[in-house]
């Protein structure tokens, strides 16, 4: 499942960060790395960007960036 497919209020664990170059490095530097739990706080009115909580920090990602991140849903 992709991070961009999660609904508001869902939690997931990062299983893979795709992409390449500067984009991938920026995502990793924000703490979005394999094994990290993320919580989808909300989406902007037009569903882009999405706001996540990662390690206690609020992070906004564009949907196209979130589509490069594979997650496993946490129940």
Image: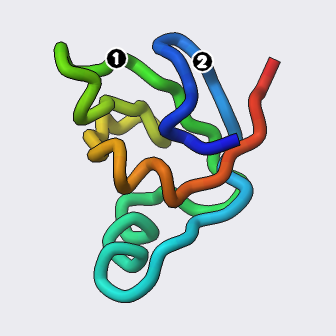
Residue 54: % across, % down: 46, 40
Question: What residue do we see at 56% from left, 26% from top?
Answer: 6
Res. 45 image quadrant: top left
Mark 1 — residue? 42
How many marks the image carries: the answer is: 2
Residue 40: % across, % down: 47, 24
Question: What residue do we see at 26% from left, 40% from top?
Answer: 60
Residue 42: % across, % down: 34, 17
Vertical position of residue 48 compared to residue 22: above or below: above
Vertical position of residue 40 compared to residue 2: above or below: above
- Badge 1 vs badge 2, beta-carbon distance below 8 Å: no
Pick the front one: 62 or 15:
62
Gap in Å between the C-alphas at discs 1 and 2? 10 Å
* Side (left or right) of 18 relative to 60: right
Pick the front one: 46 or 69:
46
Seen as rendered, the residue at the extreme left is 45
> Could you classify mark 2 by the number of other residues whose Cα lies within 10 Å: few (under 14), some (14-19), or many (20 or more)?
some
Mark 2 — residue? 10
Q: Secondary structure at mark 1?
A: strand
Pick the front one: 29 or 8:
8
Q: Earlier in the sequence, mark 1 or mark 2?
A: 2
* Side (left or right) of 54 relative to 42: right
Question: What residue do we see at 30% from left, 45% from top?
Answer: 61
Question: What residue do we see at 27% from left, 46% from top?
Answer: 62
Seen as rendered, the residue at the extreme bottom is 21
Res. 59 mark: none
Residue 49: % across, % down: 24, 35
> Could you classify mark 1 by the number of other residues whose Cα lies within 10 Å: few (under 14), some (14-19), or many (20 or more)?
some
Pick the front one: 6 or 34:
6
Q: Secondary structure at mark 2?
A: loop
Quadrant into which the C terminus falls: top right
């Amino acid at each position: 499942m992709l991070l961009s497919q999660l609904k508001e209020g869902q939690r997931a664990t990062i299983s893979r960060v795709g992409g390449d170059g500067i984009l991938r490095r920026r995502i990793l530097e924000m703490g979005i790395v394999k094994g990290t739990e993320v919580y989808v706080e909300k989406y902007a009115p037009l569903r882009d960007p999405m706001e996540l909580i990662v390690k206690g920090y609020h992070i906004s990602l564009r949907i196209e960036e979130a589509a490069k991140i594979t997650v496993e849903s946490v129940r």
